[in-house]
Image (cartoon, rainbow, N blue to C red):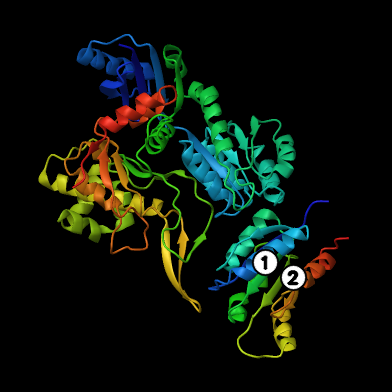
Amino acid sequence: MEKKKLVIGVIGADVHAVGNKILYHAFTDAGFEVINLGVMVSQEEYIEAAIESAADAIIVSSLYGHGELDCRGFRDRCNEAGLKDILLYVGGNIVVGKQPFEEVEQRFLEMGFSRVYPAGTSPETAIEDLRKDLRIE
Amino acid sequence: MQAILLIDFGSTFTKVTAVDIEAGQLIDTASSYTTVETDVGEGLEFALAKLKKQTGLENFQKRLACSSAAGGLRMVASGLVPALTAEAAKVASLGAGAKVMKVYSYQLIDEDIEEIANIKPDIFLLTGGTDGGNQDCILHNAGMLVDCKADFPILLAGNRSCAAECEKILSKREVYRCENVLPQLEKLNIEPVQRHIRDLFLRQIINAKGLSREAELISGIMMPTPAAVLQAMELLAKGTDSRPGLGELFAVDLGGATTDVYSMASGAPTLENTVIKGLPEPWAKRTVEGDIGMRYSAAGISTAVGLERLSQLSGLKPQKIVEMIKHTEQNPDTMPNTPEQSALDFALAAAAVETASARHAGIIEETYTPLGQTWLQSGKDLTKVKTLIATGGALIHNRDVSKIVTHALYNESVPESLRPKSSRILIDRQYILSAMGLLSIEYPDVALSIMKKELEDVSI
């Protein structure tokens, strides 16, 4: 079966590169084809990469607390660009300060993200969800 | 003596260069007007007669030619995302020496097909999707192109997963399939496309442009002129197995209608904490500014830099500049005979070189992240390139060439533009670069040593 394709990267003015590399290896080892855009990625770059490569999911990392601002309007832009049903995951230290994760998750789900992960989530959790969402046996 | 003749059928001039390959020396050059309306052979004969008068030579062991006559190699390309496959297609075409008439992104519509039929390109480059990526766009575009009224070959260099299907859709047209120009987002793959473009150029385009009768006399028209120049630059930078080259270099070719810029350099970041954006850059890169040239495109320069800047560079009043540019465009043969015309020519050339080199070079932006200062680089960082080459009729005959060309270098008032910081300036006084590119196919050592000898250091 053809490999499912993921576009990954760290959004905004965020230069945390280590987690990004860990995710790249974890997803690749799990059998995905991974297009890694690295750090400081804009919404536009994720979307363009996903269009050209016909990706199945976009996985956004944010470690520096400004994720909510950086992710605003992301789903709308995907829809506008014709990526209508693409999976959109986000994870990391995505908001500032100590907020209950359930509230944060709710806000991101309302923004159109398919799944939301708190800091400290292991890559395996996301891989499992991807397999479910992409119906990989 | 073993003399070889190198011919460049230019849009205005046909230039001949004689080289003694035994002695490894340039013998002489001559030129005459290109006669594309009748037969390009006429212009060539005039040029050869001149050369004979100068040197007494008329028998050559071999004759090789390049051509940019009759509009050059005119191409149209299409891709999916403007910054990705469409850009890759454009970069590949320019690097093959083509004149890129238009680049389309996303799905072609009826009006586009009509426009393409009017352009009548020599080759259409159809791309879109990385390998295994998007198929809809290129399949749609193949379906649109199949009924395009004009006759031109289509070069297919998109997503390999649907290449066979595209070929089938286009089966009633002339279509060639080659490797994807952008197989992965982080991997630009322009060489296979460029080889195909060159093959097509050799096989057919020359016939169509009335150059074939001439081609019988000469050993062959090998490539479009810009491809020959690119080849010469690459040789000059890299050297051969036995002789070293000059290392990374940057070159500006200022003409009457367009300005070409070349860089033979990796363009890797020179600052720490730099994040690179955009497509990977080819080591040998050519860009063309179609709106910037000394005569036909003089107004384009003024639009690009503004009258203020031209006034500053020339010392002339803006109103005067407007009048003079209008006159220049209508009379492209204008020579700088008056002090005012010389001043304007200086300003136009400096501004053209400045703009074209800035568009070619990469850009760096400083940003502050919560973790401190970071740099964002798009395009090539050429700040450490040590050699700048000036060529093109408008530069090499100008007395102020070294002063003009310094405008291609790094400028403190535009620190984001990553142009060379301290380069020596070499000028192609004999206008031999395209000839040396041709010569390098078989005699790279001779071509390299002639270039090293003939390019004149005019650094201030």
The mark that comes first in sequence, 1 or 2, is 1
Residue type (three-letter) at the residue carrying disc 1: Ile
Between A77 and A126, the one lying in front of the other is A126
Task: Inspect this view and state whether residue B104 appears.
Answer: no
Q: Using the rendered view, name the quadrant where residue B237 is placed.
A: top left
Residue B354: mark in rendering: none
Is residue B52 left or right of B219 when viewed as pictured? left
Question: What kind of residue is marked 2?
Answer: Pro
Residue extending furthest toward the top: B59
Q: Which residue is mark 1?
A: A22
SS for dot 1:
helix
The disc numbered 1 marks a residue on which chain?
A: A
Farthest residue to the left: give it: B339
Residue B366 seen anywhere in this rendered image of the structure: yes
* The quarter of the displayed image where residue B334 is located: top left
Q: Is residue B148 left or right of residue B449?
A: right
Tell me: B41 left or right of B90. left
Q: Position of residue B356 (x, y in %)?
A: 35, 50
* In the depicted structure, whether residue A117 falls above or below residue B215: below
The residue at the point 52 percent across, 32 percent down is B122
Disc 2, SS: helix
Q: Is residue B288 above or below residue B429?
A: below
Answer yes or no: are tags 1 and 2 on the same subunit: yes
Query: Between B246 and A73, which is closer to the camera in this rendering?
Result: B246
Pointer 1 local density, CA inside 10 Å: few below 14, some 14–19, many at least 20: few
Mark 2 burial class by Cα count in 10 Å: few <14, some 14-19, many 20+: some
Question: Residue A56, how many percent across, how many down?
Answer: 74, 61
Q: Kindly report the distance in space between the C-alpha atoms of the residues bearing marks 1 and 2.
A: 8 Å
Kindly indicate whether the residue at mark 2 contacts the one at mark 1 (C-beta within 8 angstroms).
yes
Q: Residue furthest front?
A: B242
Q: Which residue is mark 2?
A: A123
